Image (cartoon, rainbow, N blue to C red):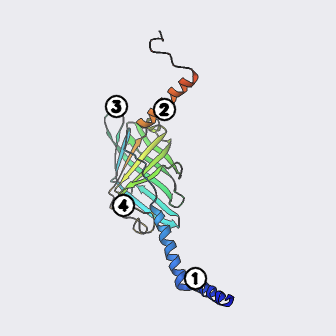
Amino acid sequence: MLERRARSTAARCRGWTSPVVRAGAAAVLALTLSGTAQAFSSLGLTGGTPDIISSFLDVTYTRTNVDGGTLTAESAFSGLTAVLDPPGSPAGDITNATFDLFADVNFNAQTATGNLTLGGDFGGFSGDLLTGSLNSTASAPTFGTPGGETLEFIFNVTGGELADLFGDTAGVILSNSGYTGSFDNTGFMGGTLVNDFTTQADTFGIVPAPGTLVLLAGGLLLYGRRRGRAPALGQCHA
């Protein structure tokens, strides 16, 4: 009995270590890893003001390792157009406009780091108009894939002539990026993506959403109640 069991165990071990089984296991592992390459969720960005629309951008994604790759969106030729729509003022063209976005995407760790630079001449301002940094983590995501070819980013504003106009954070929505649902080798056509300069970037200032303001108001009300019972209506006098 013991001898038969030992022979059976040895046969099973030989089966698991055979080249065919090992190849099959590797294929399953590869499919599993590939499936995680599309796990970023939507940030729910909808635009805002101030607003810069940059058109005719070129997008490139290159897979650099098993965890992800590098994504760039840039003004690759002089045909880039950009329009600034500042709050309370008429929109105007940005001349000599440039747009450069870089992101290092790690789909396994659910992170993305990078930077943003918008340049040009507008209303007496010249050079770098807006710069920002990207630091997206799994617990605090600032990079998203809401669906279709759209990509979303939230950058911390770090400088530029228009930094005060945008505030602390700026959102970027890339449309017609060529993204097809995955950051593996097939997701962006296996390397360099050619999208005929059809990508458009919407860069805008981000203000707290209405829901955030409601929560803030509720928190202040709760704080007031904890400090002391609120007076009844009519008890307060000027």
Real-space CA distance between mark 3 and mark 4, rounded to the nearest whole angstrom: 34 Å
Q: Amino acid at mark 2?
A: Leu
Which of these two is toward me, 153 or 41?
Answer: 41
Marks 4 and 1, the one that precedes in the sequence = 1
Residue 108 makes an appearance in the image? yes
The mark lying in front, picked from 2 and 4, is: 2
**Disc sitting over residue 216 in the figure:** 2
Q: Which residue is mark 4?
A: 178
Which three-letter amino acid code belongs to the residue tagged 1? Trp
In the rendered structure, find residue 88 and report the number of the disc placed on it: 3
Say what secondary structure mark 4 lies in: loop
Tell me the CA gap for discs 2 and 1: 59 Å
Residue density around tag 1, few if under 14, some if 14–19, many if 20 or more, within 10 Å? few
- The residues tagged by marks 1 and 3 sit, at their Cα atoms, a distance apart of 70 Å
Mark 3 against mark 4, which lies toward the viewer?
A: 4
Residue type, label 3: Gly
Residue type (three-letter) at the residue carrying disc 4: Gly
Residue 139 relative to residue 189: left or right: right
Decide which of tag 3 and tag 4 comes sooner along the chain: 3
Whether tag 2 and tag 4 are in contact, CB under 8 A, the answer is no
Q: Is residue 142 left or right of residue 84?
A: right
Dot 1 or dot 3, earlier in sequence:
1
The earlier-in-sequence mark between 3 and 2 is: 3
Q: Is residue 232 above or below residue 38?
A: above
In the picture, the disc for residue 16 is 1
Tell me which residue sits at (40%, 36%) in the image. 124
The local crowd at label 3, few if under 14, some if 14 to 19, many if 20 or more residues have their Cα within 10 Å, is few
- Residue 165 screen position, x and y as percent: 43, 35
